[in-house]
Amino acid sequence: MIDRVLLELNKTEGIKGSMVVGKDGLVIASQLPGNVDAELVGAMASAAFGAAERTASEIGMGNLEQTMIEGEHGKILMVDAGEGILAILTESKVNLGLIRITMKRAVDKIKAMLS
C-alpha cells in the first residue's frame, strides 16, 4: 500500500525517489533508484531528522514539520509521517512548492496506513 503512494509521488516532476523510514532508521518502504542504498539512506535520514527534531525543540520552534538537505546535485526533503519519516530525493532544480504540496498529500495517506 505504501509502495503505491511512493510510486505515485515519484511521478512528480523533479522527484528521483522516495521512501518511508521508521524513526529507528529501518526502511518501511522504498522506491529509490537502483544505484541508491536504501538501508544507508534510511539510517542517515532518520539520524538527520532526529537531530533536526531535537534542535527545533531545544530552540523553542515546536514540533518539526520538515527538514531539507541541499547538495550540489539534489535535495532530500524529510517530513514527519507519524510513526515514520517520508524522505524524498529530488533533482537540484525543482519546484519546491509543488514538491511540498505533493508530499503533504502523500504523508496524510502514509500516516493513516502506519497508525
Image: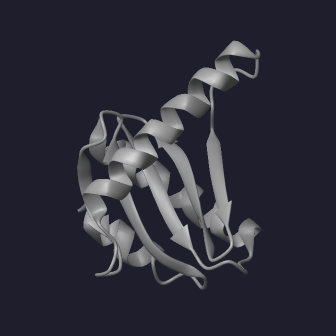
Query: Based on the displayed image, in which of its 4 quarters is residue 31 positioned?
Result: bottom left
* 27 on left or right of 108: left
Residue at 37% in and 69% down: 6
Residue 48 x, y percent position in the rendering: 51, 40
Residue nearest the viewer, comparing 88 with 98: 88
Q: Examine the rendering and report whether any part of residue 20 can be seen.
A: no
* 30 on left or right of 60: left
Q: Examine the rendering and report whether any part of residue 40 can be seen.
A: yes
Q: Disc count in the image?
A: 0
Query: Based on the displayed image, in which of its 4 quarters is residue 104 positioned?
Result: bottom right
Residue 59 x, y percent position in the rendering: 76, 17
Residue at 66% in and 17% down: 57
Residue at 63% in and 44% down: 66
Q: Is residue 112 above or below residue 73?
A: above
Residue 97 x, y percent position in the rendering: 75, 66
Q: Residue furthest front?
A: 72
Query: Based on the displayed image, in which of its 4 quarters is residue 26 positioned?
Result: top left
Residue 54 x, y percent position in the rendering: 58, 21
Q: Is residue 101 above or below residue 114?
A: below
Q: Is residue 87 above or below residue 32?
A: above
* 43 on left or right of 105: left
